[in-house]
Amino acid sequence: MSARMIMKLHVSDVYDEAPDVRVLTLRHPIRRELPESTPGAHVDLRLPNGKIRQYSLIGDPTDRTQYRIAVKREDDGRGGSRWVHESLKVGSEAHVSAPRNNFGLSSEAQKHVLVAGGIGVTPFLAMVQELSAADQHYTLHYSSRQPVPPFSDFLKDLCGDSVSIYTTHDPQAPRFDAETAFKTVEDGTHIYCCGPASLIDAVKRATAHWPPEQVHFEVFEPVIDENFTPEPFDIRIASTDAVLHVPADRSALDVLREEGFVLPSSCELGVCGTCKCTYSDGTVIHRDQVLSTAERQDQMMLCVSRARVRVTLDL
Amino acid sequence: MPENSTKKQVPVYAEPSYQTEWQGGRLEHIHIAPEASYEMEELQEANCVAGKGIEGDRYYKGVGTYSPKPDVRDITLIEAEALEHLVLNQPPMQDEPIVLKPVDHRRNLTVRGVPLNHLVGKYFTVGEVIFKGGRLNFPCRYLEEILGLPVYLPLYNRSGLNCSIIRGGTIRPGDAINPLDPSIVKTL
């Protein structure tokens, strides 16, 4: 995955879509056009401590003059969203990368089924603008705990009958049922899901019999697997035959950098795809959320994935 | 082999020659980036610090993409003419012309009328500042990735020059760039 330019953008507008969801509009102080984005793309936002958070672009993808992101305040989170809510105001400077898309619309699909949960609706806000403009066949299923789900007016106006909104705070209200929705595999239908782990898991289970290339997930949180115990392993460098030891408490990325390899990375959580590396000769324990099954045959994410005993990296 | 053919001859080009005739170059643009991957920012005035770089630049701070690699990289230069050739699609190595703007090429100085490829190991002045040509800059895939432009091949052999700053000072766009006799440097 390629390196991306980081820009110092200006916050040109701020409003609260919901009490805990803030929408920021970002513009370049000099350039008239921002780097191009496609529906489903996200940007990295740099926090003052150098950490990175990723936010989907929610605006009209054809409007190159501005980016829009929606940030849900998570007081129990890692602090990024709290900083956005407390510190970014109109006129503030935000350090934002050029967009990357790990969750693009398939050009081969005849029908798109979009499944959103909570703030996971954000990538779909851009998608439905493109799908509506292109008069494509799609359905958006949006579940939210909020009595008035964020962006529901916008979605109803734009999507009409193509959107179904499920308000899960009401025990009597209908719920989205992934098992029923995806019971029958349909040629030409692509499924896209973004939301909390419970929704992702439900859609993964319900689509287990679908061809994997027709089902797409966007995950902004790392895999939480309490049962995983990291083991030490060795890395062989293909170009030099050197062998590096990765202790159980360190990542391959850390060890390689210590040895002088200049390697790009971004989230270091296995969700952004920046530190992808080609490997051979080894059994990799894939712990990322970005590589497809096909890509996993010869690529791994150095930040979170590990290997059994030894792996050879194409470095 | 006959005796005389093994006799070591001094190759004509073994010693740096200072005979390249040029003068009257000009500094067009100054750009720095605060950190690796950050967009370049244009300056109307820059403070060059001997042995370090431009104040505020990622290589001055040692946080550039290539900072861990040992080499002279105080300041990097590229020829405005090379950028213009890309617009003309010369050499014709890509499908269409490439517009590589001074703000995008990630070298610090865009210069005109300065034969950078001739200045390896040589001294020259930019305004009051003295530079020494280090190694020729090599195009990198990183630049292609960050720009999304296929500039790697077209920049081959004219990707600019990495220089060390011998005597620091302030530079501004419009400053004259001229060769400097190395004997003068020794007296400084």
Image: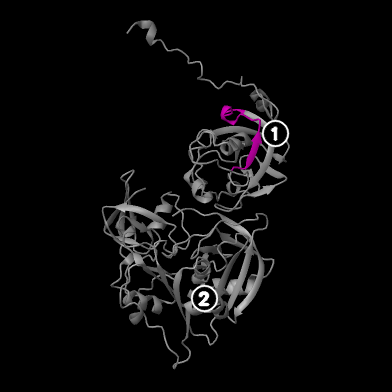
Q: Chain of mark 1?
A: B
Same-subunit check for callouts 2 and 1: no
Considering every residue shown, the one lying at the far bottom of the view is: A172
Going by the numbered disc 1, the residue's amino acid type is Arg
Q: Which residue is mark 2?
A: A159
- Label 1 CA crowd tier, 10 Å (few <14, some 14–19, many 20+): many
Can you tell which quarter of the image residue A60 is in?
bottom right
> A116 or B52: which is nearer to us?
A116
Decide if residue A176 is on the left or right side of residue A124.
left
Residue A268 lies in what quarter of the image?
bottom left
Region of the chain picked out in magenta, as a range: B107-122
Residue B15: where, in percent of width, then height? 53, 20
Above or below, B18 relative to A228: above
Report whether residue B22 is seen.
Answer: yes
Q: Nearer the viewer, mark 2 or mark 1?
A: 2
- Callout 1: SS: strand
Please state the horizontal and vertical placement of residue A262, each as a whole percent of the image.
45, 50
Closer to us: B89 or A198: B89
Report if residue A220 is visible in the image. Answer: no
The quarter of the rendered structure image containing the N terminus of chain B is top left
Q: State the SS at label 2.
A: helix
- For image coordinates 34% across by 77% down, the residue present is A182
| Label of residue A290 in the image | none
Question: Measured along the vertical axis of the image, is residue A244 above or below residue B185?
Answer: below
Q: At 33% across and 81% down in the image, what residue appears?
A: A179
Spatial CA span between label 2 and label 1? 57 Å
Looking at the rendered structure, the kind of residue marked 2 is Cys
Relative to B22, B94 lies left or right: left
Check disc 2: other Cα within 10 Å, few if <14, some if 14-19, many if 20+. some
Q: Which mark is residue B26?
A: 1
Q: Position of residue A35 (x, y in %)?
A: 57, 56
